[in-house]
Structure formats: C-alpha cells, structure tokens
Image (spheres, helix red, strand yellow):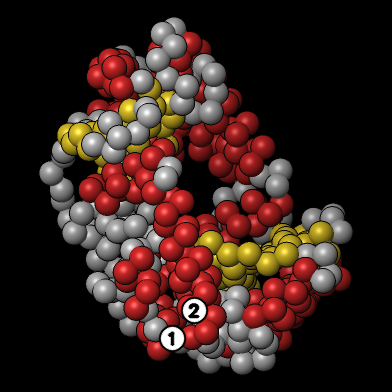
C-alpha cells in the first residue's frame, strides 16, 4: 500500500492524501505559480498575491478570514517560492471541511481590496527593509540573481518597494487568472480519515470551479558567464558564497548532488567544511552548503561568514576541499557514514506530518508521483563514490563567487 493515495477532480485539480492516526489534520493547496511566472514590471506580485489572499473574499472580510480557523484553535498560513505558492492549514480532524472551504474561498474568491492592499504594501516594504539588514540572507538572493541573470529565475521574490507600491487590484487579478489554473494545483492532506473522505470534502468545495489550463510555458534559463565579485556592504563580517547552477528536479544526478552538498557542508559538526574552517582553524561560526532544484535548473551554494581579514583564506580552504573531492573518491566508510546521515535527516524531517504533507504535495505537483520513504532510502544507498566524484567534477567545473565586505 502506498503511503499516499491520489485522486483527481473533474476540473483537473489533483489530490493526494495519507491516512495517519492523529487528532490533528494538515492540508494545503499547492499552486505551480511563483516569482518566475512574473512579467517585467510586476516583480514581487506573486508574493504580494500570497499576502493579499488573506485580505478579504467575496464572502468574508479580512478579519473573518483570519479568525475562521484560529477561533477553532487552528491556523492558516502561506508562503511563496520561485516556482510555487502554497496555502496551508492545521486543524483538528473534525474541522477538516472548514479548512478546505476556507482555502477554496481565498484561492478562488479573493477580491484584493485596494484599502487592504495599501496596508499590505507597507508590510512588505518593512519585510524588504528587514531582509536588507540581514546580509546572510541577502547574499543568497544577490548570488541567485547573478546566476540566473536575464532569466525568469533571476529576480528577488520580494520585488522592490517601488514596484510593489504601484501594483493594483486589477494587476493582482490578472496574475491570478494567468497562473492559478486548476491544471497547476494539487491539494495535499494528512489526517485520520480515508482518501475517499478527503476526496469527498475537497470535491465539495474545490470541484465546483471551472476547469482552467495554463496558456504559456516557462523559459529555461540561458547559459551564463561565471563571475567573481566583491561588493562593499560595510558589514561587520565578510559574507561569501561560492557556487554555480545545479541540476533540475527531474535530473537523476539531483540526489548525488544533494548528498555531496550534505557531505561538504551539511548540518553536522563532522561535515568537511565545518571541520576545516571552524573546528580546525576557528575561522567561521557558520559555513554551510545548500542545493535548491527547480523544475528545469537549480543552484548550489557554499556560504560562509568570517572576519574580513580571513575571507580569502576561507575561499582558498573551500576551493582546496572542492578540488580534493573532485580528485579523490570517498572511501567506503566515509560514504557509508554520509548515507546514514542523509537518510536519518530525511526520516527525521518526515516525522513532522505537516512537513511530510507539504513535501508530498510539491512532489506530486512536479513529478505526478511520490516516492515512499523506503524507495527514497534505496535510491540513496545505490549512490556510488564514483557518481559523487563525477557529479562534483561536473558541478564544480565553473564556479562563481560573491563576497560582501
């Protein structure tokens, strides 16, 4: 039996459900629409729409949207990424239908009233200012903008204050009409009821809306020139990123690259870069490697912070370890330990029913399938030291670098 069971509504919305023993239910509507679907002149609109979904519908005022689940002890929240927007709720099992009804209301009947948009623009402007005060976060966006320069992926999710200030109610409706189509939606749920019950409730509230289909295709990013840039930010520390584009989510090399990033700079004290920069030399409090796959591309990045006088030393040490992992395949023991760590991380992350539900929804949206944990573990265990070496040589062939000083 599959961990998740699936269904599809007549209007094209797909559903995915897992039955578990719990008094709490988690559910989400995942929409395949994010900042890469924005047109020039509307950068930041996907994120603004996510905020504005809570600001009133044809049936509810803003305070009624916010209180509907909270008065029951539940919660409603949302987030936006480069490629998707997710509206998710947590409630007690017997309040599942209320959560589904509210999600349907805000997704399909939001009115984006101008008086509410005015307030929300100020909230997002404050969010942008807060982000600018955090160089450890800002450098990731600046690096990604450079890596994907000139493409749909090459701009900040938050947008700029000037653009946000002039986006109108009509423009938000136009964006939603263009991108929030039923063929690009998945409803994901985890709770103590059958898939038939889940489908019945979801179809009652989401199945009555007309079927719509996306009329455009995303453009894959073009090739780019590697760079090495130093930007004066007058920060107390130097912040740096070394990285490049990564594999897309459908590429079979995605999993070896994710494992490689974990080996280099995962959340363990024995990751290679943590040992070299922090444990051995005390140069950096924070060094980490990350990999974010997109539908047709991706990005991996090694981030570090250090005193200004040690930034070049850190760069050299990181590059030394990159060259080494490209040249010398991991020993059987080192690879075995890395796999056990990676699998344990996956298992622990799935202990959260909410996290599992959100991950499964996105996976089903992109893959039209979901691996069981056992299937994912098997794929990890089949990765060889030579595969990791090959992926390292391919991925690290043309590195780029951005340093804040």
Quadrant into which the N terminus falls:
bottom right
Report whether residue 348 is seen.
yes
Measured from the top left, where is residue 280 in percent x and y? 44, 7
Judged from this view, the residue extending furthest toward the left is 225
Instruction: Tell me the crowding category of disc 1: few under 14, some 14 to 19, or many 20 or more residues within 10 angstroms, Cα based.
Output: some
Residue sitting at x 63%, y 31%: 344
Q: Relative to residue 47, is residue 136 depicted above or below?
A: above
Kind of element beneath mark 2: helix
Could you tell whether 17 is left or right of 10 in the image? Answer: right
Please tell me which residue lies in front, 347 or 279.
279
Please tell me which residue lies in front, 296 or 106.
106
Q: Which residue is mark 1?
A: 169
Q: CA distance from mark 1 to mark 2?
A: 8 Å
Please tell me which residue lies in front, 123 or 321.
123
Residue sitting at x 60%, y 34%: 345
- From the viewer's perspective, is the residue at label 1 or at label 2 nearer? 2
Q: Which residue is mark 2?
A: 117
Please tell me which residue lies in front, 403 or 392.
403
Q: Which mark is residue 12?
A: none
Tell me whether circle 1 and circle 2 mark residues in contact (CB < 8 Å). yes
Report whether residue 394 is seen.
no
Measured from the top left, where is residue 8 in percent x and y? 59, 77
Residue sitting at x 43%, y 26%: 287
Report which quarter residue 236 is drawn in: top left
């Amino acid at each position: 039996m599959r961990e998740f069971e699936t269904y599809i509504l007549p209007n094209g919305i797909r559903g995915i459900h897992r039955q578990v023993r719990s008094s709490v239910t988690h559910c989400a509507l995942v929409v395949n629409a994010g900042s890469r679907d924005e047109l020039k002149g509307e950068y930041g609109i996907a994120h603004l729409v996510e905020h504005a979904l809570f600001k009133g519908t044809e049936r509810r005022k803003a305070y009624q949207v916010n209180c509907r689940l909270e008065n029951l002890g539940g919660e409603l929240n949302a987030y936006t990424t480069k490629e998707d927007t997710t509206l998710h709720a947590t409630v007690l099992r017997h309040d599942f239908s209320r959560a589904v009804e509210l999600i349907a209301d805000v997704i399909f009947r939001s009115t984006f009233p101008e008086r509410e948009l005015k307030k929300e623009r100020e909230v997002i402007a404050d969010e942008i200012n807060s982000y600018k005060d955090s160089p450890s976060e800002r450098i990731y966006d600046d690096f990604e903008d450079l890596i994907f320069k000139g493409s749909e992926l090459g701009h900040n999710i938050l947008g700029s204050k000037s653009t946000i200030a002039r986006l109108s109610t009509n423009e938000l409706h136009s964006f939603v009409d263009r991108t929030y189509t039923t063929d690009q939606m998945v409803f994901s749920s985890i709770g103590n009821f059958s898939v038939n019950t889940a489908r019945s409730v979801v179809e009652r509230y989401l199945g009555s809306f007309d079927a719509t289909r996306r009329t455009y295709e995303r453009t894959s990013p073009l090739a780019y020139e590697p760079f090495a840039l130093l930007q004066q930010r007058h920060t107390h520390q130097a912040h740096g990123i070394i990285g490049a584009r990564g594999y897309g989510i459908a590429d079979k090399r995605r999993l070896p690259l994710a494992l490689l990033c974990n080996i280099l700079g995962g959340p363990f004290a024995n990751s290679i870069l943590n040992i070299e920069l922090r444990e051995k030399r005390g140069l950096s409090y924070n060094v980490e490697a990350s990999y974010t796959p997109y539908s047709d591309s991706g990005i991996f990045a090694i981030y570090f912070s250090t005193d200004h006088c040690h930034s070049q030393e850190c760069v050299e040490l990181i590059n030394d370890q990159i060259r080494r992992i490209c040249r010398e395949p991991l020993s059987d023991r080192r690879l075995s330990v890395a796999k056990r760590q990676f699998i344990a991380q996956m298992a622990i992350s799935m202990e959260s029913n909410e996290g599992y539900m959100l991950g499964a929804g996105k996976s089903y949206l992109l893959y039209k399938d979901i691996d069981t944990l056992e299937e994912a573990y098997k794929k990890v265990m089949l990765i060889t030291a030579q595969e990791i070496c090959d992926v390292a040589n391919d991925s690290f062939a043309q590195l780029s670098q951005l340093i804040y000083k």
